[in-house]
């Protein structure tokens, strides 16, 4: 769990601390539609190693952005979903999407 006393005073810096990593923002993007298993998430993101994905998911779980559900099956099934806090990043993702679209349109003009 995140200790609020260790977070930056600036809210923008706090947000960047939690999602500025290239992979974390893509994990949020790909979990917004719903729950995914590890292999589905790895495929949807693209060129990410298992080690890096695992590390990012663990950090995001510790930060309260991702929920990890382990099912007692053989073989074990693990699913990942966004917490309410993670889902609240949708407006940030939408803003990044819109800005990227405008930027690309401006370059094409």
Image: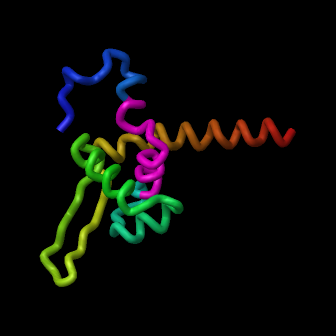
Is 58 colored magenta in this rendering? no
Q: Residue furthest top?
A: 9
32 displayed left or right of 74: right
Is 17 colored magenta in this rendering? yes
Q: Residue at x 26, y 51 (%)?
A: 58
Quarter of image, res 50: bottom left
- Here the colouring is rainbow
Q: Is residue 67 above or below residue 109?
A: below
Q: Position of residue 31 (x, y in %)?
A: 40, 57
Q: Residue at x 40, y 23 (%)?
A: 13
Q: Position of residue 64 (x, y in %)?
A: 24, 43
Q: Residue at x 43, y 61 (%)?
A: 49
Q: Nearer the viewer, residue 53 or 79?
A: 53
63 displayed left or right of 51: left
89 displayed left or right of 72: right
Residue extent of the magenta highlight = 15-30
């Amino acid at each position: 769990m995140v200790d609020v006393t260790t977070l930056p005073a600036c809210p923008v810096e706090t947000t960047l601390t939690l999602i500025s990593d290239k992979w974390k923002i893509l994990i949020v993007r790909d979990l917004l539609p719903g729950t995914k298993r590890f292999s589905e998430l790895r495929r949807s993101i693209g060129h990410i190693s298992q080690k890096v994905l695992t590390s990012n998911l663990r950090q995001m779980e510790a930060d309260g952005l991702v929920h990890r559900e382990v099912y007692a099956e053989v073989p074990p099934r693990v699913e990942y979903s966004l917490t309410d806090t993670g889902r609240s990043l949708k407006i940030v993702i939408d803003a990044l999407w819109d800005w990227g679209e405008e930027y690309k349109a401006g370059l094409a003009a």
